[in-house]
Image (spheres, rainbow, N blue to C red):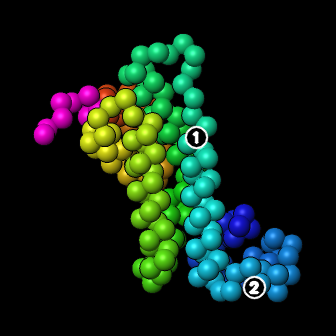
Amino acid sequence: MEATLAILKVSGVEGVTMRKVASMAGKSLNNVQHHFKNKEILLNNLADFYFTQCYDDIAQFSPSNRVDEPKQVLYEFVLFILGQSEHISDACLVFRELWAVATRNTELEDKLNQFYVTSIDRACIFWSDYDRANAEKAASLLLPYVEGYSIQHKALPVDKKQMAELLSETLHTLLTQPVND
C-alpha cells in the first residue's frame, strides 16, 4: 500500500498501475494481481490504509502534563491538528484523487463518507465531557477546516498559533453553549 500511495502522490490516479505498484514494491505483477484483482480494488484498499494512517496520526495527541484547563487542552489539540495538516499537506492531494475516483466507484465513495462520519464520531468521543450535539457541531466545523488548512496554510496571514487560538475559542464556545431541546 505504501508503494501505491507514493505513486498516487506523484502521478495521481492515472499514474497508478498494477505494474508500477509491483515494481515500486519489489513484488511480481502476479503477486500484486493475486491480492488486488483490479485497480478499483487496489484503490479501495489504499483508502482503508490511508484512513488508518490518518487516525493513527491523530491518536498520537497527548496534552502536556502542565495542562488541566479544558480550554487549554482544546488549544493544544487544535495546535497539534494544524501542525499535522501542515506536515501532511499531501493529504489534500490524496483525498482529491480518491474523491475523483469515487464519482465512478460507489464503494470508495461510501468509504470516504464513512471516514468523515468516523472522524466526527472520534472527535465526539474525545470531547465526551461535552454534550454530544455540541461536540458534533464543533467536529463538523473542525474537520473541513483542517482539510482546507492543509491546502492554504502557507498563504494565510495568521500564523498557526494564532489560528489555533481563534479556532479553539470558537470550538470552546460551540462545545459549552446551552443545548437547545
The picture places residue 35, in percent across and down from the top left corner, at 74, 79
Label 2 neighbour load within 10 Å: few <14, some 14-19, many 20+: some
Query: Which residues fall within the magenta stretch?
Result: 173-181
The picture places residue 36, in percent across and down from the top left corner, at 70, 81
Label located before the other in sequence (2 or 1): 2
Give the residue at mark 2. 33
Q: Residue at x 45, y 36 (%)?
A: 126
How many labels, in total?
Answer: 2
Q: Residue at x 56, y 20 (%)?
A: 64
Amino acid type of the residue tagged 2 in the rendering: Gln
Q: Residue at x 80, y 72 (%)?
A: 24
Can you name the residue that lies furthest to the left here?
181
The picture places residue 129, in percent across and down from the top left corner, at 37, 29
Q: Which mark is residue 59?
A: 1
Q: SS class of the residue under badge 1?
A: helix
Is residue 116 rendered to the left or right of residue 16?
left
Can you name the residue that lies furthest to the top here?
66
